Image: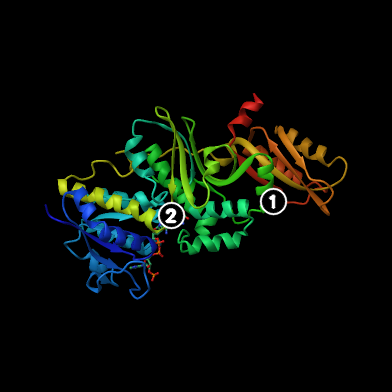
Amino acid sequence: MKPVQVGLIGFGTVGSGVVRLLTEQRELLSQRLGSDLVLKKVADLDLDRPRPVTLEPERLTTRADDILGDPDIDIVVELMGGLDEARQVVLAAISRGKHVVTANKALLAHHGNELLAAAQEQGVEVAFEAAVCGGIPIILALRQGLAANRIQELFGILNGTANYILTQMSERNTTFAQALAEAQEAGYAEADPTLDVEGIDTAHKLAILMSLAYGARLDLDSIAVEGISRLDPLDLQFAREFGYSLKLLAITRDDGYRVEARVHPTLIPRDHMLANVTGAMNAVYLTGDAVGPILLYGQGAGMMPTASAVVSDILDLARNLSLGVKRRVPPLGCEAALNSTRLIKPLNDLVTNYYFRFAALDRPGVLSQVSGILGKNGISIAAVIQKGREVKGAVPIVMITHEAREADARQAMREIDELPVISPPTIFYRIEDPHLHAAQI
Ligand code: NDP
Ligand code: HSE
């Protein structure tokens, strides 16, 4: 059978892992494919930078066009990152009838509908297993393994950098800046780490997972996003005192009419499986109506785990090429996905439990003023911690609430922040705790 030829654009962290797998595992991959899988060319702007893997100079180029214009190359792998140039590169590959593999979740979240429509038009495929959770085959699971299910809810720790920072801060008292620097050093972080710590990368990935879960167009703008960059270590301590871990979660839930779409720091019980996902590890905990709960766990970032996913896509496309089949499974798992949308539940309509931390003057009657406002807004308190007088000035009062509407929680917070005995702003986080729901019944 004719060898399948691959061109790679972007010889950085992930690109180096892909080069390593395609060269060092060439025999294994060719055996699995049944024909030779050849890495023909690799493009990068800087060919002199030291890399963990080397290639003969004749396979290297600084021009992406040398790959896009090569008629022998069947599959273009985009690992350059970024948005505008990557979009041009992917569109150019598609227009030349080449299949594309990308790990670029930002590109997919912003331009995925356009790119997938262009690929459909040209009869080529765009594969993106590495774009969500690095080495965990979550895209394959949603596209194929769970195809018989309606996905009822999905919780994800989708960003290794943010999870690494939260773990280091809570378990080792590391500062935010130090933990971020370590994640950058390890190659987990994005070129612009704001994407990691502000929850934007997690939102990019959630947009992709929601499209697959619901068979609908990508809709990044509908996701409510809050990050971890302003997190006070005090809240990690209080969370622990209440029996919770604080995680940056991607959450979507289908009530049959509307779907939730949110990314924010979330308190979860310390005995929840996601609470034990530490360091740069990723996990997705989802419930399908037929299969019940499923947990997928593994390395969501880094050179080799991400390269593992990229090469699985290359192999899959190469198999299709060898067999002469195309687009057997639609990219979003549903033929009608690009023409379908889901109604999003506005954040104000969310009903969940809340963690509030007020900074209050240590005077008689403060607690009753605060709880009075919460009561007036229909919010019932499940637990309280008030710290003693050893703290000068304002003392922290921390409350956990029973289920309340987000709009009511925000209104109560505004009113409480106007009290003369309170130093605003009040801190609040959402809680996902089924035990707390049960406790209210
Ligand atoms: P890197 O920055 O390490 O690598 C990107 C490489 O592409 C750099 O060497 C860059 O060169 C090169 N490049 C940029 N523009 C061009 C161009 N026009 N032509 C040729 N080469 C170009 O990024 P990563 O490998 O970390 O990430 C690559 C992609 O994979 C991103 O989309 C990222 O979001 C995604 N990803 C990364 C993961 C990770 O753990 N790192 C995990 C999952 C996904 P130069 O540096 O000189 O600009
Ligand atoms: N910056 C991302 C992370 C890379 O930390 O998870 C994987 O997508």
329 relative position to 373: left or right: left
Viewer-side residue, 121 vs 190: 190
Q: Residue furthest left?
A: 1
- Circle 2 — which element? loop
Observer able to see residue 193: no
78 relative position to 251: left or right: left
Q: Residue furthest bottom?
A: 48
Q: Is mark 1 within 8 Å of ligand 2?
A: no
Q: Is mark 2 within 8 Å of ligand 1?
A: yes
Up-down relation of residue 332 to residue 23 (above or below): above
Q: How is the image coloured?
A: rainbow
Up-down relation of residue 41 to residue 161 (above or below): below
Three-letter amino acid code at disc 1? Answer: Leu
Q: Residue furthest right?
A: 364
Name the residue: 60% across, 35% down: 352
Q: Position of residue 303 (x, y in %)?
A: 39, 59
Q: Look at the image and tell me in which quarter the C terminus lies.
A: top right
Q: Position of residue 107 (x, y in %)?
A: 39, 56
Which quadrant of the figure has residue 416? top right
For mark 2, does the 10 Å Cα neighbourhood hold few (<14), some (14 to 19), or many (20 or more) residues? many
**Is the residue under label 2 in contact with that under label 1 (CB below 8 Å)?**
no
Q: Which mark is residue 301?
A: 2
- Circle 1 — which element? helix
The residue carrying mark 1 is 234
Name the residue: 32% across, 53% down: 310
